[in-house]
Amino acid sequence: MNFALSPEIEEYRRRIRDFVSRHIIPVENQPEARDAHENLKIEELDRLRKIARAEGLWALQMPKDRGGQGLPIVGMAACYEEMNRSLFGPAVFNAAPPDDGNMILLNKVATEQQKQKWLQPIIDGKVWSAFAMTEPAPGSGSDPAGMMKTTATRQGDNWVIHGRKWFITGAEIASHFILVARTSDDPRRGLSAFLFHRDQPGWRIDRRIGIMGPEEHGGHCEIVFDGLEIPDEDRLMEVGDGLKATQIRLGVARLTHCMRWLGLARRAMETASGYVQERKAFGSTLADHEGVQWMVGEVAKDIQIGRLLTMHAAWMLDQGDFARKEVSMAKIHVADTLNKAADTAIQLMGAQGYSKDSILEWIYRYARQAKLVDGASEVHKMVLARQFMSNSADFWHWGV
């Protein structure tokens, strides 16, 4: 692949970087702009979103005829990295999870009628959405096909849902939900996907689960289904395509996580870099100390490796490849790199980095989830091991 960005993508990247610096980063240090869960207050987010939309930086991942910018995945990689130099950037540009992954899935597989009803309001920023798949043990986690307990039973023209989901990101404020439930015992085609609105009866949020790090808007919730009825017209794809829908969604969503995490990793090291170039100890700045240079250089190297892995996977997805191996490699490496960057930056800045005077402690707590979400690192290593065992030397092919 050619690693040079097209003039159009480079222009978007430059404009987003400038927008983040001018409009979003200054808000980070305003305590009154944050909510009780350490995220941006909705009214402040809406203000910034209006500016982003007016500047033509809204929903980069969506087609132009739906109000987006129509960027390829390679373009998303370059721009999402710049967005997430700020803690709050992705939400401002309508590129934050879970809406981001839900929009990409619906745009790919929904019918035109479903797109108008369920997708367009998310693109327009009128509603939030959630993706309900993960369940408490012994239900589905990394193995949804084999372990999902939530059921969807056909009754006439409706499907009746019973079960429980948890750690459903954004559920507290979501209006549109994508639900994956069991419709048969078929090992590959036993799951189906459905769409429902928060106002439909037969379900409830049991609790908002407290987490270690700062939370996305709407938190991470545990949901109970006790007779939710979903019309068959709101089934997504065919009966038995639930696992396929999940794989389509997560293939790109895992990579967009990597794009955003690289932005946070860069921000962490940029913050530490400014500090070590000014702070003096033993007669010279910290940046002049060889040990500090080793720490900075190693993380800088790992960030660049992560960027190359992510961009390569993005390019393959743009070519129509599933890029499962490449996405797994990026997910493992970038998750590790974000944690390493946050930890190293705090070590370099000492007590100031560990304190709430710095954004680093926010990034540090947020980073830990990266090794868990959308497949734990160990699961992705298993995927790579299986592919290697099956393909041997061809595992490292270049493609033709």
Image (cartoon, rainbow, N blue to C red):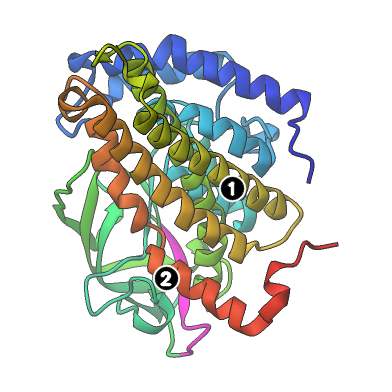
Q: Does 398 sit above or below residue 284? A: below
Q: Does 326 sit above or below residue 394? A: above
Whole-percent x, y for residue 119 in the image: 53, 45
Q: Is residue 51 left or right of residue 340?
A: right
Q: Which mark is residue 379?
A: 2
Q: Amino acid at mark 1?
A: Thr
Pick out the residue farthest to the right. 400
Place residue 105 in its image quadrant.
Answer: bottom right
- Residue shown at 30% from the left, 51% from the top: 369
In this view of the protein, which residue sits in the foreground, 112 or 356? 356
Residue labelled with disc 1: 310
Place residue 320 in its image quadrant.
Answer: bottom right
In this view of the protein, which residue sits in the foreground, 329 or 134? 329
Quadrant showing the C terminus: bottom right
Q: Amino acid at mark 2?
A: Val
| Residue 304 is covered by the magenta coloring | no
